[in-house]
Image: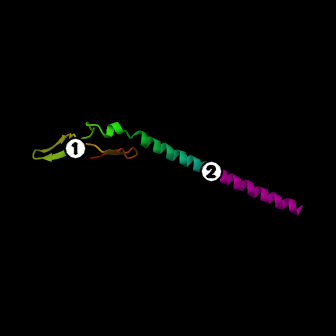
Amino acid sequence: MNKALFFKIILYFSLIGMFIFSLLFVLYVYNISKINESSKSIADSFSLSYLYSNNPSYSISTNTLDNSTSTSFNNFVIGIIKIDRLKLDYPIL
């Protein structure tokens, strides 16, 4: 009887350990899939044709003598840093 109790305790600890391991593995896979989804959305927003276009969709505000007007410069855009969560599009000139 003593041996049977010992093996039951080992069985229960093994089952609990496998459950915890399975739960941690599922959470790890879920976390990796979320990171991949975020990376894919960032990669999809990156467009080479937009980066090297001559018509950037931003304007630079300059300060003139008659207080300020917004003018658009036709600069060469090397890249754009885009952060969707912060709604930030920052051109690299």
Q: Which colour scheme is used?
A: rainbow
Label 2 to label 1: alpha-carbon separation: 49 Å
Residue 93 percent location from the top left of the image:
27, 47
Q: Label 2 neighbourhood size at 10 Å, few (<14), some (14-19), many (20+)?
A: few
Give the quadrant of residue 61. top left
- Label 2 or label 1, whichever comes before in sequence order: 2
Residue 53 percent location from the top left of the image:
29, 37
Amino acid type for the residue under numbered disc 2:
Phe
Give the quadrant of residue 51. top left
| Residue 89 in sight from this viewpoint | no
Residue numbers of the magenta segment: 1-23
- Identify the element where label 2 is drawn: helix
| Residue 16 in sight from this viewpoint | yes
For the point 22% across and 40% down, which residue is it?
Answer: 74
Would you place residue 39 above or below residue 7 in this image?
Answer: above
In-front residue for pair 74/2? 74
Lateral position of residue 60 relative to residue 85, left or right? left
Give the quadrant of residue 41. top left
The dominant secondary structure in magenta is helix
Residue 13 percent location from the top left of the image:
74, 58
Q: Which mark is residue 25?
A: 2
Residue 21 colored in magenta in the image = yes
Q: Name the residue under label 1.
A: 60
